Image (spheres, rainbow, N blue to C red):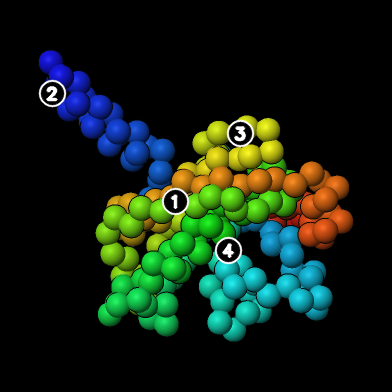
Amino acid sequence: SERRKTRKKSIFAKKYQTHYFPIYKRGVKFMKKIKNPWLPLIGKGYNCFACAPCNPYGLKMEFYEDGEDIVSLWTPDDNYQGWLDTLHGGIQATLLDEIGGWIIARKFQTSGMTTNLNIKYKKPIPTGKDITIEIRARVKEIKRMFIFIEAEIRYEGVVRSSAEMTYYTFSKDVAEKDFMFTGCELEEETNNE
């Protein structure tokens, strides 16, 4: 009986996971691109290692909204290896942390800061120009000013790393005054105006 319950849970988890986390083959065309709200700050010092398109050493991540999820599709260049043809764990941590920040920007229309980041490295992630990985995150829970987020990195539909993180969110006044955040829109919202 106990064994049957465990087997039933694992079958449900597999079905749920496949349904809830669509793999890359679904394509970008089904997702809505998020406009980078910090682009106007490039001349004022915006040079984020993870998402600034102008940082010559950066990851240059771009983000999409897919229902409740925020998604980034990224190519892990060989310059980001830890071991031969394997993505460095610190880069994986950066990818996961950054997508959490974009959850805050897009879903809550404010700024925030990471207060906790727990990562499980499950399988190696290959590097190379022909590799595309999917970084995907969603809100798990909200408690006052704290947002609990879960995220994962997938390659070929398989979870390679996962994270649970906590973000402290700033009031919209503080976000605008101290972090120059004025909103995070989809590109199509901006183009329709």
Q: In this view, does 47 lie above or below 23?
A: below
Between the residue at mark 3 and the residue at mark 4, the CA separation in whole angstroms equals: 25 Å
Instruction: Look at the image and tell me in which quarter the N terminus lies.
Output: top left
Q: Seen in the image, is 76 located left or right of residue 122?
A: right
> Tags 3 and 1 in contact by the CB under 8 Å rule?
no
- Give neighbour class at mark 2: few <14, some 14-19, many 20+ (Cα, 10 Å): few
Amino acid at circle 3: Ile
Give the camera-side residue of 159 and 18: 159
Q: Which of marks 3 and 4 is in front?
A: 3
Report which residue position mark 4 lands on: 62
Which numbered disc, 3 or 4, marks the residue that appears first in the sequence? 4
Q: Where is residue 10 in the image (x, y as percent from the top left)?
A: 23, 32
Which numbered disc, 1 or 2, marks the residue that appears first in the sequence? 2
Which numbered disc, 3 or 1, marks the residue that appears first in the sequence? 1
Report which residue position mark 3 lands on: 142
In this view, which residue lies farthest toward the front? Answer: 115
Q: Position of residue 180 (x, y in %)?
A: 82, 60
Can you tell which quarter of the image residue 47 is in?
bottom right
Between the residue at mark 1 and the residue at mark 2, the CA separation in whole angstroms equals: 30 Å
Amino acid at circle 2: Arg
Q: Nearer the viewer, mark 2 or mark 4?
A: 2
- Using the rendered image of the protein, determine whether residue 29 is visible from the camera's viewpoint: no
Amino acid at circle 1: Asn
Can you tell which quarter of the image residue 86 is in?
bottom left
- Give neighbour class at mark 4: few <14, some 14-19, many 20+ (Cα, 10 Å): some
Report which residue position mark 2 lands on: 3
Q: Nearer the viewer, mark 1 or mark 2?
A: 1
What kind of element bears circle 4?
loop
Report which residue position mark 1 lands on: 118
> Tags 2 and 4 in contact by the CB under 8 Å rule?
no
- Give neighbour class at mark 1: few <14, some 14-19, many 20+ (Cα, 10 Å): some
